[in-house]
Image (cartoon, rainbow, N blue to C red):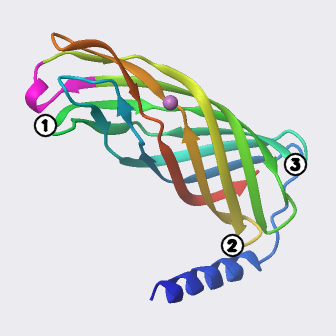
Amino acid sequence: MKHAVTRSLMAAAITLGSGSTLALEQGDWIVRVGAAHVNPDASSDSVAGSTLDVGNDTQLGITLGYMYTDNIGIGLLAATPFKHDIELVGTGTVAETKHLPPTLTLQYHFAPRSNVRPFVGAGLNYTNFFSEEGKGALAGSSIKLDDSWGLAAEAGVDIDINDRWFVSGQVWYLDIDTKADISGVANNVNVDIDPWVVMIGIGTTF
Ligand code: NI
């Protein structure tokens, strides 16, 4: 069953990829829109004898790219605000927060003239947390998460549907480390969120 699914996905990718080519070159802008899923690989300092974990979320993602040369591009990841539950392991959800993690990367495009265009990138992430709120055992407590600057790595591939549109898959690893202040409980709690972000969507160039 698994192999059948893999085979049909590969066949679909080859069918998509065999259409006419949407070649990239210096000066092109690229826009991609899709579902962006943030999956934290969280860890934290000890809080009340346990640690904090951070849940997943999916939002509308948008990436904007600019080809600085035929192979070197600049990429920006933006999205509608992500909302995450914060869990005290063993206790349950004790808070939630929203955040925006704009990420700027310098990219290398391996095959800008192909109809299957892989690329990799590295750069910087800035994450702004807002609307933090205590829940459950911490309902009514004030919680503050510091903004974070960190390194980002990405990989992606665009596969042409026709000479105007392509399907796109992108993945980022973001180093997001924050400090949490939970009034009356703990201050300066180091929380490493360090999520994988996966975005599947469609795109075009102009
Ligand atoms: Ni980290």
Q: Residue at x 62, y 52 (%)?
A: 32
Occupied quadrant, residue 189: top left
Which residue is identified by label 2?
161
The quarter of the rendered structure image containing the N terminus is: bottom left
Secondary structure of the residue carrying tag 2 is: loop
117 relative to 37, above or below? below
Asked whether, in this view, residue 110 is left or right of residue 92, the answer is right
47 relative to 122, above or below? above
Secondary structure of the residue carrying tag 3 is: loop
Circle on res. 91: 1
Secondary structure of the residue carrying tag 1 is: loop
Nearest to the eye among marks 2 and 1: give it. Answer: 1
Rounded to the nearest angstrom, the CA distance separating label 2 from label 1 is 48 Å
Rounded to the nearest angstrom, the CA distance separating label 2 from label 3 is 21 Å
- Given the image, on which type of amino acid does mark 1 rest? Thr
Nearest to the eye among marks 2 and 3: give it. Answer: 3
Asked whether, in this view, residue 72 is left or right of residue 45, the answer is right
Rounded to the nearest angstrom, the CA distance separating label 3 from label 1 is 50 Å
